[in-house]
């Protein structure tokens, strides 16, 4: 099955005063250059990258990819760019991304393809946990072409309405994955973040810095000892064949998850040796659980740590999760070097001055039944 990608850079960019958005620089590089680099870092290789553009064609051609002008006149939108790409591509699948989303998740294509394989839907579309749907970030099967042509021929050019009408499934990615740069203000803000110019409080506000802004170990001697519990989790995504080997226990190194569980427990016990300013804590319990999601081809590691002490145990839980996932990677890297560790986060903490804290997890990543 062949797979191509098209970067949509053929819009009029009215909110950018009509400037050719793909060629506007972000931190010294044209925006389309950032997008192309993100595509080249995908965990699943792309056969060909195409660029949809309607002006400054030589400038886009300089990036070394085919540049295609819309067949339909008067800038009917992203659907026209997709049509132009597929008129020049024999690919079975087409990944669609806009030129103003410079940073794409490295597993974007992996998650999209898993969703389409599991659901047999004609298209998969990106969204974030806040419910925002990014219609121009999607993966399409070639058999959507008749519907695409019918809509364009009848003057229907709204991407979202078309994708909903053909039964696209949604794949949820973490917040911040698709920072659209629609205005000069958006561009300036992201450039500031990339340069490190955005103000970050340090001295006196981050507890591991003293009043002079120097790193130090926090004094917890005057704190009361209380029961403290923390839960963290993270995922590792892999090829379906790799997941099958783990599930069936047929991996040549043996029980992958059993060994990763021991590694996670050991990491929790050694956290203060790994994190420079972390206090050593007497652990009273470490619980490690692994769960498998065949649709997303993912193993999730969840760790709960408990202690009776003067400082929190979040770092132990987070360290254990990451070492557990790293152990899975180490044991399976011979068959799958493209595994991706992601969404490592604290889920809940109990005890201490701040009391009980929890975070709501993102919505389930797909809208089709898990198997």
Image (cartoon, rainbow, N blue to C red):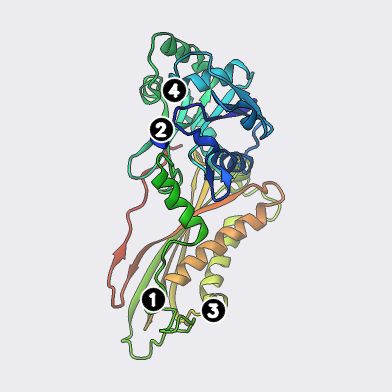
Q: Residues within 10 Å of mark 3 (few under 14, many from 20)?
A: few
Dot 4 or dot 3: first in sequence order is 4
* Residue under numbered circle 4: 77
The N terminus: image quadrant: top right
Query: SS at mark 3?
Result: loop
Dot 3 or dot 1: first in sequence order is 3
User: Residue at (38%, 68%) from the top-left corner?
Assistant: 230
Point out residue 168 in the picture as x, y percentages from the top left corner: 42, 26
Spatial distance from mark 4 to mark 2, Cα to Cα?
29 Å
Q: Nearer the viewer's eye, disc 3 or disc 1? A: 3
Spatial distance from mark 4 to mark 3, Cα to Cα?
52 Å
* Image quadrant assignment for residue 179: top left
Q: Nearer the viewer's eye, disc 4 or disc 2? A: 4
Query: SS at mark 2?
Result: loop
Mark number for residue 65? Answer: none
Spatial distance from mark 1 to mark 2, Cα to Cα?
38 Å
* Residue under numbered circle 3: 276
Q: Nearer the viewer, residue 26 or 88?
A: 26
Q: Nearer the viewer's eye, disc 1 or disc 2? A: 1
Spatial distance from mark 3 to mark 1, Cα to Cα?
15 Å
* Residue under numbered circle 1: 312
Question: Do residues under tags 1 and 2 come within 8 Å of each other at their CB atoms?
Answer: no
* Residue under numbered circle 2: 368
Q: Is residue 104 visible?
A: no
Spatial distance from mark 4 to mark 1, Cα to Cα?
52 Å
């Amino acid at each position: 099955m062949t797979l191509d990608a098209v970067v949509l850079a053929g819009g009029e960019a009215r909110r950018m005063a009509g400037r050719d958005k793909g060629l506007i620089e972000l931190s010294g590089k044209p925006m389309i250059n950032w997008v192309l680099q993100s595509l080249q870092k995908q965990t699943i290789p792309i056969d060909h990258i195409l660029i949809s553009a309607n002006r400054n064609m030589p400038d886009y051609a300089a990036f070394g990819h085919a540049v295609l002008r819309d067949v339909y006149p008067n800038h009917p939108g992203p659907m026209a760019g997709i049509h132009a790409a597929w008129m020049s591509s024999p690919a079975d699948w087409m990944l669609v991304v806009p030129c103003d989303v410079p940073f794409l998740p490295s597993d974007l294509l992996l998650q999209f393809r898993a969703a389409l394989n599991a659901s047999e839907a004609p298209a998969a579309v990106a969204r974030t946990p806040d419910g925002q749907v990014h219609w121009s970030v999607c993966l399409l099967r070639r058999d959507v072409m008749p519907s695409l042509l019918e809509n364009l021929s009848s003057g229907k050019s709204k991407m979202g309405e078309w994708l909903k009408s053909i039964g696209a499934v949604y794949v949820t990615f973490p917040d911040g994955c698709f920072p659209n740069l629609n205005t000069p203000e958006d561009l300036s803000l992201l450039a500031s973040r990339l340069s490190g110019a955005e103000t970050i409080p340090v001295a006196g506000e981050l507890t591991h810095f003293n009043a002079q802004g120097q790193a130090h170990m926090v004094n917890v001697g005057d704190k009361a000892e209380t029961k403290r519990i923390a839960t963290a989790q993270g995922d590792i995504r892999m090829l379906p064949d790799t997941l099958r080997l783990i599930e069936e226990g047929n991996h040549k190194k043996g029980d992958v998850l059993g060994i990763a569980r021991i590694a996670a427990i050991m990491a929790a016990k050694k956290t203060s040796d790994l994190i420079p300013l972390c206090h050593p804590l007497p652990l009273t319990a470490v619980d490690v659980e692994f769960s498998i999601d065949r649709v997303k081809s993912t193993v999730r590691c969840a760790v709960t740590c408990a202690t009776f002490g003067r400082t929190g145990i979040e770092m132990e839980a987070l360290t254990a999760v990451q070492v557990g996932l790293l152990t899975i990677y180490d044991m399976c890297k011979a068959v799958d070097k493209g595994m991706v560790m992601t969404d490592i986060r604290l889920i809940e903490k109990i005890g201490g001055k701040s009391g009980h804290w929890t975070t709501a997890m993102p919505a389930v990543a797909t809208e089709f039944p898990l198997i």
